[in-house]
Amino acid sequence: MEARKILVKGIVQGVGFRPFIYRLATRFNLVGHVKNLGDAGVEIFAAGQHEKIEEFINAITKEKVKNARIDEITSTQIELPDPLPEKFHILESGGLGAPGTIPPDTAMCPACLDEIFDEKNIRRFFFPFNSCTDCGSRLSTIHRLPYDRQNTSLHKFAMCNDCQKEYENPDDRRFHYQGITCKNCGPSYTLHDAEGKPFLTSSVKNLIENAITMLREGKILAIKGLTGTHIAVKITDDSILKKFRKTFTRPQKPFAIMAGDMNMVNKIANVTPAEKDVILSSARPIVLLKSNESSRISKLVSPELHNIGTMLPYAGIHHLIFKYLDEPLLMTSANFPGQPMLTENSAIIEKLRGVVDGFLLHNLDINNRCDDSVVKVVGETPLFIRRSRGYAPSTIRLPFKITKTILCLGSELNNTVCLIKGSEAHLSQYIGDTRHTETMEYLSRAIDTLLEMTRTKYENIDAVTVDLNPAFDLKFHAEKFCREKNLKLFPVQHHIAHSGSITGECGEKEIVVIAIDGIGYGLDGKIWGGEIFTIKNRIFERAGHLEEQKMPGGDLSTIFPLKMLAGILFEPMGSKLRDFLLEKKEHFKYGKQEIDVLLRQIEKGINVVMTTSCGRVLDSISALLDICYERTYDGEPAMKLEAIATEPSFELPVVIKNGIFYTTPVVLECLKLVSAGKDPRKIAASAQTAIARGLAKMAIHEAKQKGIKTVGLTGGVAYNEMIHLTIKNIVLENNLNFVTNQQVPCGDGGISFGQGIALSLISDWIE
């Protein structure tokens, strides 16, 4: 007989790991204990026969509990204690809790789902908060480590006797589950009218039936879930959706929908096997699916787009609602543009009173809001557009070790924060648009949560990163934050950060990166967005870029793409440009007068910014093809351009000289094709393909010149399927490796992660 002390690190809290160890130890006739042990993860003391202990350790990894992630196991032989324990025990948590080990919130598992529809299960029939070690709330309810009940929102709800018996029963799947609850002792829902006054209902079933009646009548309902609040409404009535869009000032922005099951999904969208795997995963993200034209869903859900964001129920309340509904619901986050999603009942009622027709609320506090994750499958590869509920705060294992602790504050839009320590990156849930005060406050709380969960003190942070752009409120906030905390701030250029995110995922320290997006402040003070970077010998070299184009009015050109188009066409068209623009004068607010002012502005160079942005070129082509004249949400003109594209039937010029890809010839050729009456759908496809070909050609040239074997693609334009797959195929045809972001978003949600990696690489902080 011998004894071992075994330490396990990883995601081992809140997933039923200690009960799992207890059952294994009992099976192998071992005695001892298991407990959460401070910053060391989970400690196991096991005594028994040598062979049985070896089998036990092997079983820990082979039979790993669902939702756990084991990063490291160490085993040390120790002296047998005298006397030996009589059996194996689960001890109370010790220390402060293991850092960075909280699992994400996940969808209700099949076993819990069966219980809420089992009339014989008196305690859990129609109980929306049903969960177990395999599912339910984690990040959203915890406020400190270790993951014990008193450190979660459920501390207000004492276990009833029946729950206590399940908690203490080794054969029960809720054995030592901190979130155990039922109708007799758990949280509850209430239904409120438009003014916030609660209805009197006899049961949860009756409450759900009343809510369903409201939805069927076309009423707008705020529904509080486990990680935040949605606004729900039916999606088959145009008049209701027109009113909805006007109320929330979202004239064109696509909304997500929730379908009851895959049968319902298949009626509204064409789903590939790869997309099915993602939408059915326990994370239950919103997945962008290609719309089925025969669907009864209103076109106002996703105007002029070819795909529709779709998710399946993940919380108990969703499943109970769809028991009575045979059609999908619009499900969008309960927030006004740019502001964080509402989570507190008083704030939900105060801000949405007079806007929605009813409230379906519960009394379980949401400590950490978590927006729905969004995924787009390009080819067979799932790409995160937003990495949040279901994924955050799972750590990202780095392919190398970083010797410094870095707090990364990201970019202004689609913000996330990231803490990099050793071989791990801890990426927060989606934060949002930091131009708004409420979001900046949310960012500050997210930083505190991240540091708490990772057991990181401010004095142990070696560096703080933020986007280089001096105009960002976030940069000012970062400077103030670092002064107050006596920390060193390192601004990182936007596209260098994008490039760093690729390196941080694939581990390649020598790589050519195509970084393409809408906007990013460049090292030369101009606006970048169509960049080729080579990374070699710890140096990020800007090896190529798109042609610099005039961007009259600065940000105004991002809102009104005809202005951007005028900037591109000003020199090649000369005096003919005015006549061309006058044909589109109805798309200028002040008509002919505005056009004349615009042309004088470009001629004199007044408030004209130069940009290499790929997104702005796509926007200008969108306006040229009469697709989109005003951007009402991020990426709208380019997304609508992608939506209409069919086959690339025309060979557009790809002109590259001295590392510059000239995009003016591409736009001019599109203009000729439009004038010749060619199909705009084919022109759209041809233009996107030409841009992809030019970018790929530049990257491949750099790779072969410098002996680099890998090309990466990142940035917001990487979500464009035609551009993405064209670049990928050309790279592979040239016998080079192709990589893209798969663990963090290609867009600005991955910037914080990339900032830390780029700074570490440049500063030689990587082992």
Image (spheres, rainbow, N blue to C red):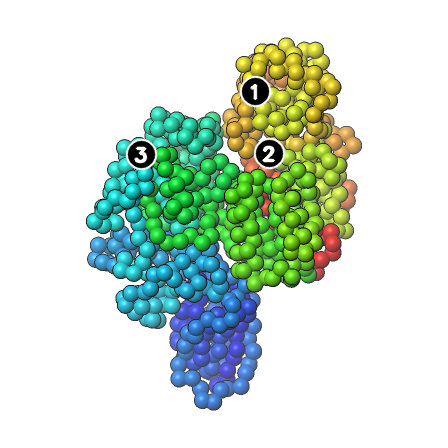
For disc 2, the neighbor class at 10 Å (few under 14, some 14 to 19, many from 20) is: many
- Of the numbered discs 1 and 3, the one sitting upstream in the chain is 3
Q: How many marks?
A: 3
Tell me the amino acid under the disc marked 2: Ile
Tell me the amino acid under the disc marked 3: Lys
Closer to us: 482 or 108: 482
Residue 581 is at least partly visible in this image? yes
CB within 8 Å, label 2 to label 3 = no
On the image, numbered disc 3 is attached to which residue? 219
Q: Residue at x 47, y 82 (%)?
A: 47
Q: Which image quadrant for residue 163?
A: bottom left
Q: For the residue labelled by badge 3, is the local secondary structure a helix, a strand or a loop?
A: loop
For disc 1, the neighbor class at 10 Å (few under 14, some 14 to 19, many from 20) is: some
Q: Position of residue 554 (x, y in %)?
A: 65, 28
- Of the numbered discs 2 and 3, the one sitting upstream in the chain is 3
Q: Residue at x 77, y 44 (%)?
A: 706
Closer to us: 318 or 432: 432
Mark pair 2, 1: CA separation: 18 Å
Q: For the residue labelled by badge 1, is the local secondary structure a helix, a strand or a loop?
A: loop
